[in-house]
Image (cartoon, rainbow, N blue to C red):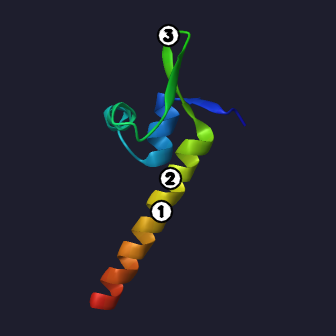
């Protein structure tokens, strides 16, 4: 598995648009590097963020189920 992944794959993993991924990087939420003129992102960081998003989503769904 490659440690660096392109923008399109990051967007797919996170379920976001490419613009949203760029914005997250500009805000410092994701680290990136420019390689051969293209932005690449660090797979472990992206996967950790995706896992955190999933945990937050499951917690929100649990709270909604309790309050319903």
The residue at 47%/42% (across/down) is: 12
Locate residue 24: give its quadrant.
top left
Task: From the viewer's side, name the closer residue of 31 and 56.
Answer: 31
Q: Which residue is mark 1?
A: 54
Question: CA separation, marks 3 and 2?
Answer: 26 Å
Assign the N terminus to one quadrant of the image: top right
The residue at 44%/58% (across/down) is: 53
The residue at 34%/90% (across/down) is: 66
Question: CA separation, marks 3 and 1?
Answer: 32 Å
Residue 6 image position (x, y, % from top left): 53, 27
Question: In the image, which disc is placed on residue 37?
Answer: 3
* Disc 1 crowd, CA 10 A, few/some/many (<14, 14-19, 20+): few
Q: Which residue is mark 2?
A: 50
**Element under disc 1:** helix
**Residues tagged 2 and 1 counted as in contact (Cβ below 8 A):** yes
Residue 65 image position (x, y, % from top left): 34, 85
User: Between disc 3 and disc 2, whose residue precedes?
Assistant: 3
Residue 30 vs 68, above or below: the answer is above
Assign the C terminus to one quadrant of the image: bottom left
Task: From the viewer's side, name the closer residue of 11 and 33.
Answer: 33
């Amino acid at each position: 598995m490659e440690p660096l992944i392109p923008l399109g794959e990051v967007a797919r993993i996170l379920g976001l648009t490419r613009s949203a991924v760029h914005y997250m990087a500009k805000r410092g939420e994701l680290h990136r590097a420019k390689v051969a003129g293209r932005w690449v992102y660090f797979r472990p960081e992206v996967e950790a963020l995706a896992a955190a998003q999933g945990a937050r989503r499951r917690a929100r769904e649990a709270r909604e189920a309790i309050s319903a």
